[in-house]
Amino acid sequence: MISLKNISKTFHTKDKEVKALDNINLEVAEGDIFGVIGYSGAGKSTLIRIINLLERPDSGTVTVNGIDLLGIDDRQLREVRSHIGMIFQQFNLMNSIDVYKNIAAPLKNRKLHPKEINQKVEELLSLVGLSDKKHAYPTQLSGGQKQRVAIARALSSDPRILLCDEATSALDPNTTQSILRLLKEIHDKLGITIVIITHQMEVVKSICNRVAVMENGKIVEQGDIVDVFTNPQSGIGREFVSQAIGSESVEKYFGKFRGAIYKLSFFGEVTHEPVLSYIATEYKITVNILFGNIETLHDTVVGSLLVELLGADENIAAALDYYKSLNTKVEVIKNAQQPYSERH
Ligand SMILES: Nc1ncnc2c1ncn2[C@@H]1O[C@H](COP(=O)(O)OP(=O)(O)O)[C@@H](O)[C@H]1O
Ligand SMILES: [Mg+2]
């Protein structure tokens, strides 16, 4: 549905050049909720603005719904853009008009009968849960309510794609979750493809089915959310995953442990099995659980455990082999301080 090929973009300012995008390749399929995660300055906003050509790339191709956007004229581009909605961190509402008029604004150019406009706006108000606020002004609303108005406005032109640039970054955690639930509901009800730019793995984890990780203008890894979550390939990908599962805070104490520390990542069926207690008895090792997290990502149960394993080296190796045979991933986080033979 959205295909970016070999996209590069450099900004030239008075004193320097910034390569904001460096040979980006990205495929978003119809029906995806696609997350792009990266720290500030990674190039995320530039990337999302390339999708509707608010920013023009220096090189590469942008294809949306089979149309090569760099090969069409302004009138055709306006038509394509009318099917792409966008929301932002700062909401970008017009403060001098009420909620109703903000949502109706994009409908003005469509030569609709006032009755049709009214019906459409009422439907959207109900969809975003703000029917009782239609005559309020943006300054009278909370952040979450403002974002709901922005979402309704973005949907008024019946887009097939919704682009979200840090849409929840100005909101508290509860409001963030309620906006994410709304986006998921819109995706399921209206079948809209969503692209979400964020610096929070929490956001990606909550609703995305696919994710790309960005650093210094490059996509360093991308894939299915469960794959990236259980087996991140890049350093920065691992960092985001640790943040999201909450293991970061315990990782700094690992120096204190004598035994080797492993990260065990698993998903699906195996999460129902008492695997750790099995390997402890079967291979005569002691398992010290330092951190555990199990959750559901897109109907798949995903688990992650940080464990210290104590016992004879060959027993630990055999236990880990058994563990790997269950299609789970084992990562060495820290080696034992001394070989087992010298410890005993
Ligand atoms: N219009 C611009 N002019 C000059 N530099 C820009 C412009 N837009 C973005 N940049 C630079 O490009 C890099 C990527 O920016 P951006 O895409 O906004 O990153 P992100 O959204 O991930 O924070 C940053 O170094 C930023 O300063
Ligand atoms: Mg940005």
Image (tube, rainbow, N blue to C red):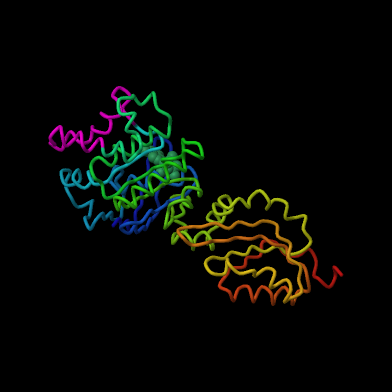
Q: Quadrant of the C terminus?
A: bottom right
Which of 126/16 is in front?
A: 126
The vertical placement of 328 against 106, above or below, is: below
Which of 28/60 is in front?
A: 28
The vertical placement of 317 against 25, above or below, is: below
Left or right: 238 as drawn, with respect to 220: right
Which quadrant holds residue 81? top left
Left or right: 306 as drawn, with respect to 90: right
Q: Quadrant of the N terminus?
A: bottom left
Q: Position of residue 156 (x, y in %)?
A: 25, 40
Q: Position of residue 40 (x, y in %)?
A: 48, 42
Q: Is residue 17 visible?
A: no
Residue at the image position 58 percent from the left and 74 percent from the top = 326
Q: Is residue 261 visible?
A: yes
Magenta stretch: helix, strand or loop mostly: helix
Which quadrant holds residue 293? bottom right
Left or right: 339 as drawn, with respect to 161: right
Q: Position of residue 272 (x, y in %)?
A: 58, 67
The answer to if 119 sits in the magenta stretch is yes
What is the residue that sits farthest to the top in this orientation? 96
The vertical placement of 192 against 14, above or below, is: below
For the magenta stretch, what is the residue range?
93-122
Q: Quadrant of ligand 2?
A: top left
The answer to if 17 sits in the magenta stretch is no
